[in-house]
Amino acid sequence: MKKQTYRFKYVLLVALGFLLTACVSGGSIEQKRQNVQEMKNKVLNELYEEKPDVRAQIQSAAGYAVFSNANINLIFASFGGGYGILHNNRTGTETYLRLGELGVGFGIGVKDFRLVMVFHDNPAMERFEEYGVSAGVGADAAAVASDQGAAVGGELNMDNITVYQITESGLALQATVKGTKYWPDPELN
């Protein structure tokens, strides 16, 4: 029975990976980059509409990152993955990124959400660029489909980084401890 559970979780993780790869796939490398840029612009516009003061916060920050993420919660385990982009306000350079998440805790459901990370100073952004790791404890509930429903997420401040979460769609209830790894996308950089 245990082997079947691990096999099932592995299949779901692989399926999630393919799903997320498909979100950026299709076409040339330039088209894939354009898809990431369009996602970034859409997410930032949604965030600015919801919280207008964030625009000034991002403009005065050392940099910011925007991610598209999908997450699956299966009772005691949480898996996720996605893609995004890191923008350095000082130099204007952009780095295309991938992410993977793994967590433990109670949860069930699937959620498609966006993250915006604002790096308020250079050391915070440099730590993110160098290590690409974040860990945290989270609890949220989401029931969103076709712009209908509600999501509880929000804003988190730590270590000179503010993280905003926008839930796009999904049905999930979770309380997890999870770690996330971010790394440069070898295809798009």
Image (cartoon, grey):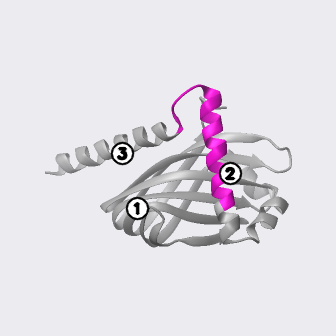
Examine the rendered structure and indicate whether residue 71 appears above or below residue 142.
above
Asked if labels 2 and 1 touch by Cβ distance under 8 angstroms, the answer is no
Q: State the residue in front, 132 or 162.
A: 162
Q: Residue furthest left?
A: 1
Please state which amino acid type lies under the numbered disc 1.
Gly
Under tag 2, what secondary structure? Answer: helix
* Residue assigned mark 2: 41
Q: Residue at x 18, y 51 (%)?
A: 2
Mark closer to the observer (2, 3): 2
Q: State the residue in front, 19 or 150.
A: 150
Q: Is residue 107 magenta?
A: no
Asked if labels 3 and 1 touch by Cβ distance under 8 angstroms, the answer is no
Query: Magenta stretch?
Result: 24-45
Mark sitting on residue 170? 1
> Disc 2 or 3, which lies upstream in sequence?
3
Crowding at label 2, few (<14), some or many (≥20) Cα neighbours within 10 Å? Answer: few
* Residue assigned mark 3: 13
Examine the rendered structure and indicate whether residue 5 appears above or below residue 45.
above
Examine the rendered structure and indicate whether residue 75 appears above or below residue 64.
below
Q: Position of residue 56 (x, y in %)?
A: 82, 66
Please state which amino acid type lies under the numbered disc 2.
Asn
Q: Position of residue 3 (x, y in %)?
A: 18, 46
Estimate the spatial distance between the alpha carbons at disc 1 and disc 2, rounded to whole Å. Answer: 22 Å
Q: Residue furthest top?
A: 28
